[in-house]
Image (cartoon, grey):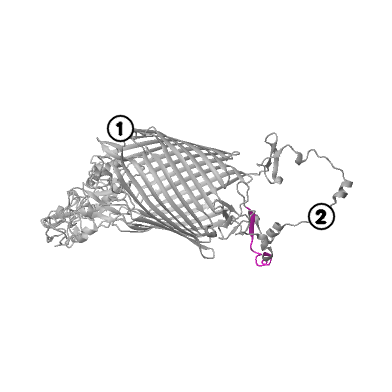
Amino acid sequence: MKKNYLLLLPFTITLLQAQNSQLYYSGKFLTTKDKAQNFLKIYNKNSGVYELTDEKGFAIIAAKAYDTLVWNQGKNTHVISTYELRELKEILENQTGSKSVENIYSKAYDSLVSKEIKDDFSIEKATTQLSKRSHSYFDDIRKLKQKNDTVYVLKRINKTALLFNGSFTTSLDIKSRNAVPETQNKYVQGRSENANLVWKGPETNEMFSFGPDISTLGFNGLPYEYDQNGKLTPWVNGLQRAQRYDNNLFKTTVGYNNQLNVNAFIKEGSSEKIRLSMNLGQQKNQMYFIDQFDVTNTLKTKLNADLGRYYINLAFNYEENKATNTNRIGLFNRAYQNSLLTPVSFSNEQNIFLNNGSQRSYSRYADNPSFLFEQDSKYRFRNRDRQFSLNVAKDWDNFKLNITQSYENSNSWNQDQYKPSTYGFISGISNERIQNNRSYHSNIQGSYSLGDYDFRNTFSLNFILNDKKSDIYNSLTHQKYLYQRTSQDHIFNYNMNIRDYDFEAGFNLGNSFYISNTSLKNNYWLPKANFYLKFNQIFNWYNYSFKLLGSYTQLSSEPEITRSYASYSTTLLKAENYNQYFPIQEVESFRGLSNVNTKEWKIGARLNLGYNISVDGEYFSKKNSDDIFPVFENNQLRLKNIADHTYSGYEFNFAYERLRLGYDMYTTHKVSFFKYKDIVDRVAPGYQDLAVSGFKDIYKTLSEGQVLGAVMGSYFERNASGQMIIDEFGFPKKADGMKIIADPTPDFVMKFNHSFTYKNLSLDINWEWKKGGQLWNGTQAVLDYYGRSYSSGEERNIKNYIFEGVHTNGTVNQIPVDFYDPNLNVLENRWSRYGYLGVAENYIQKADYVRINNISLSSDFPINRNKQTLRLTFYVNNILLWQANKGADPNQNFYDMNNGRGLDFFNLPSFKTFGCIVSLKF
């Protein structure tokens, strides 16, 4: 559609009285080559109105001071100042122009009275020319500079100014834990003896809570070092009633975060020449365990300089982190486990130590969580990270050169310790772990461009050098591990972009080399190809566009040498021997491995429907060959190329932006849908059903044809028809061996974002829904085994129950059973008869959840005519969580391992956070 504002002049003048209060912005919109951008859409983000430029690139758009204009699909922006706004009448009059009456000129008369004057110094006869890089406004010219014999450059006057700005942000957050397993608070520590339920005190080292009802007991009042109220006996008149103790380990805690950012910069005219930035920060992250926290101090400085088409960036970052404890040895999981298993008749808080100096716990086979957190020094973890980087860039019009150099040094120190009398380490154990990481990174990139905005070709070469060193020392074994890797990436790229009024296209082709001293074989063929096609203004509808894109990429990679695989030692232990977990064995070497080769391709599309609605989708497939996994061989932890697997799926996104609900009120809604699978295609001989995380008797496995990380565990025996086999005692029969019993992969994940804006007030809500997937709830299994679970407390008095199933001879089961028969040994009841973990299949639960991730309410308060701004934000995280399983948040990982999703063995609960952020910009 073609617009000509001159034709609107008569109509516009009739509306001037009604438009006195409306101001407009006008101007020409040019490309980087000073070419008029005709029929370009100019969009006012604040008011929502838009206009198209005419054939000369000129446009008039209604606006207010400080409104933001955007064009070229948001790539270019401009904030309108007060002096750029004018009334429509004034703009139109300036467009039409005016001319005064001139004197009548007669060439014949002039020839008679004048004489031709020869001017040898006229511009027309000059042998020199003006450079295209001269400034166009001659009233701002400062000096004339001779570039060579025939070219001069006009330099403008630049006003130099030293300016300062910055911001200060402070936040306060309050944390409390989310869902935890429900436990029974009715039955005390003990078991049956001679058909009677008997309380058995901590000195007996009893672990089970299959004792009598606490309401039938009382304190004898005699001195007893395990309880200040005395021992428990059957209650009679005159005795103090037994007390239910709350051994909750979690507290509501408060943390804070302060950040100060200061900038000083020198401007010449409108360009910034030098900028110095400094950021100071301090954060205290308080865990939901009392007296467990970490403190982080940061210093970041950056210097940017523009030295006449030379661009220099210098940066230095320093970070120091201190923590009372880390979870490297599973300390937090261990404390949490013991707090849940502590019988209701025992208080962990009364005292930490016995008279002999050993820990006071409800059994020698258990720990007091407060004792585990007892330490001589305030901090058991320290880390210092220093990073320095230099970036230099030079621009010669079509040729650009960029050089980046950086060096990083990181030192971490852990004091992993259990004191004497700890269960599993009766004499105590201590290890000082020191890790030093050093990294040098160099990146040199050169690119050359041909063509203009409409048709542009770019060739680039990129050389990347990474040199990394890492050493780890464990004082317990007096062993030091040394790792070093030098790798090179040589990357060639060709990029082509085509732009027309209603069509855009881009193509990228390239190849790279990967060379490494730790790789078994270097790779010199890593091609990639990308493309996109975009059709604008489809059906001649404004801002209706369709984009098709795709890519194919091959990559080679190696495992990060600074990563520790020590936690893999859990796979050497059975779950009941968790108390022996103390990882100190690191990977022997990162050498002699083949690269992990990845082939990935994607295809997707995006559809914009007007200015508000967009829909996009993508399908992807990523094939990983010779992927690397840790294994224990000959009592050594090694890395091996073991499996091929394919990660594939698709994603869809829908957005409705800036839907107007009323005056100054807008809303935005975004929805994403994500579905994926990671299937194992091949497993190397001898490694089928390898454990990738977990314990020896329950783990996530690597099995050909199955999803990566399927859960392997014990199961009930069934016949060919799927009927459960019942043993001679009337209980379901546990099968021999293990099999895959669960798939942690969800059916899909959907995420939602809702935003509401009214003037300076904004409300954001983010939530997600995960459907499908399974997890093994080992926490529930162990609580059942010891009689601490809520279900074991509610169901232990069930009698004459008949399990549905058949016997081995095919007859239907008719044997009635009592879930807990006091006449039998405690290990023969419904929950303890199958052992510490029970039957793993019985504890497979759904991992569905609905979670409100974040709700935030923000408001801006302008100060001093918008020169300073105060922003206030209130937020809550994880405020609502519905989950299908009975236990911790299904997103929590086994012993905090990255690949531990799907196993719940006393996984730490997630936490909800209430916070406030105050930010001042000055």
Q: Position of residue 140 (x, y in %)?
A: 69, 45
Point out the stretch of residues depicted in magenta.
12-28
Looking at the picture, which amino acid does disc 1 mark? His
Horizontal relation, residue 318 to residue 681: left or right: right
Q: Residue at x 83, y 54 (%)?
A: 103
The residue where tag 1 is placed is 478
Instruction: Say if mark 2 contacts mark 1, CB within 8 Å.
Output: no
Q: Nearer the viewer, residue 442 or 877?
A: 442
Give the vertical position of 641 relative to 758 (above or below).
above
**Badge 2 or badge 1: first in the primary sequence:** 2
> Which amino acid type corresponds to the residue marked 2 in the rendered image?
Glu
- Quarter containing the N terminus: bottom right
- Residue denoted by label 2: 102
State the CA–CA distance, disc 2 to disc 1. 101 Å
> Residue 430 placed where, x, y %?
29, 38
- Kind of element beneath mark 1: loop
Q: Give the x, y percent position of residue 261.
A: 51, 46
